[in-house]
Amino acid sequence: MTRSQGPVVALVPAAGQGVRLGESKPKAFVDLGGKAMLIHAVDGLLRSGAVDRVIVIVPEEMVEATQAMMSGDVTVVAGGSERTDSVRAGLAVADDARYVLVHDAARALTPPSLIARVVAELRSGRSAVIPVLPVSDTIKTVDVLGAVTSTPERSELRAVQTPQGFTAELLRRAYAEANGVATDDAGLVERLGERVRSIVGEPTAFKITTPLDLLLARALVEEGTR
Ligand code: C5P
């Protein structure tokens, strides 16, 4: 088998509580035009035509109910207290993967074409691929008291989206050697000193985090844009 072949397995960590959204249920199960956010995210992965199998990671008490919601080749497992614990739980049942995508359930409206582009980069020989967009705000770092400590050059900054794609070998190595948690998986790969390739993301792959994001997502679904 050449490097470009082999199964693509997508992990969808959906075990967070999503407190910033202010809804009564875990974020991934919040309704978006008649379907849970998680279902939108899984459908997008399967519709990309680039993903062979999906593994969804949810809070332990929701495993059974989530499996009942799924059709197609979708496995559901229990997550952990940090996002990295949830990804680790998914990786543990992805033995067959040659490539792994890590996607957020909260990026429910990610276009299938973006997912296919990430996979195409992996199949062309890249080991780590992330979608990014330029930032429109100026970003500052601050200390615990709120005093500004620096202003990074905006033209060099990018907001990072998912799915993030990796060869299974590299992601497993990053998790094996990872100490501490990370807000994205590419961060763990960077700590190994490995090169991460960025590609142009999509505005509709935004993370539904706040009530304002949810309003926008619902408007997009209603409008039939997604
Ligand atoms: O908290 P954040 O918005 O970065 O979470 C990104 C994704 O990771 C969400 O889809 C969330 O459900 C998931 N997550 C998880 N396990 C956790 C925390 C977050 O699967 N313990």
Image (tube, rainbow, N blue to C red):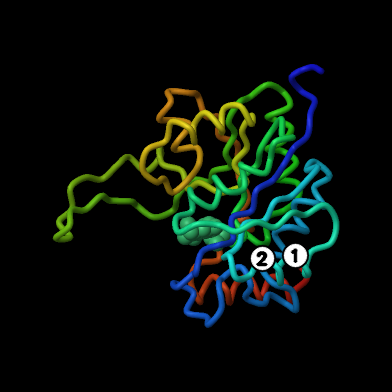
Q: Is mark 2 within 8 Å of ligand 1?
A: no
On the rendered structure, is 4 left or right of 101?
A: right
Decide if residue 28 is in sight here. Answer: yes
Q: In the rendered view, would you say 101 is above or below 172?
A: below
Mark 2 near mark 1, Cβ–Cβ under 8 Å? yes
- The residue carrying pointer 2 sits among few (fewer than 14), some (14 to 19) or many (20 or more) residues within 10 Å by Cα, namely some
Which element is circle 1 on? helix
Image quadrant holding the N terminus, namely: top right
Where does the image place residue 179, in percent across and percent down from the top left?
37, 38
Could you tell me how far apart the alpha carbons at marks 2 and 1 are, in whole angstroms?
Answer: 6 Å
Rendered residue at 74%/19% (across/down):
3
- Which amino acid, by three-letter code, is at mark 1? Gln
- Residue linked to disc 2: 63
215 left or right, relative to 76: left
Residue positioned 54% across, 70% down in the render = 213
| Quarter occupied by residue 20 | bottom left
Q: Is residue 207 visible?
A: no
Residue 92 placement: quadrant: top right
Q: Position of residue 9 (x, y in %)?
A: 72, 41
Q: Residue at x 68, y 21 (%)?
A: 125
- The residue that appears at 67% across and 77% down in the rendered structure is 31
Quarter of the image with the C terminus in it: bottom right
Q: Is residue 79 above or below residue 187?
A: below
* Residue 48 drawn at (x, y percent): 80, 47
Q: Which residue is mark 1?
A: 67
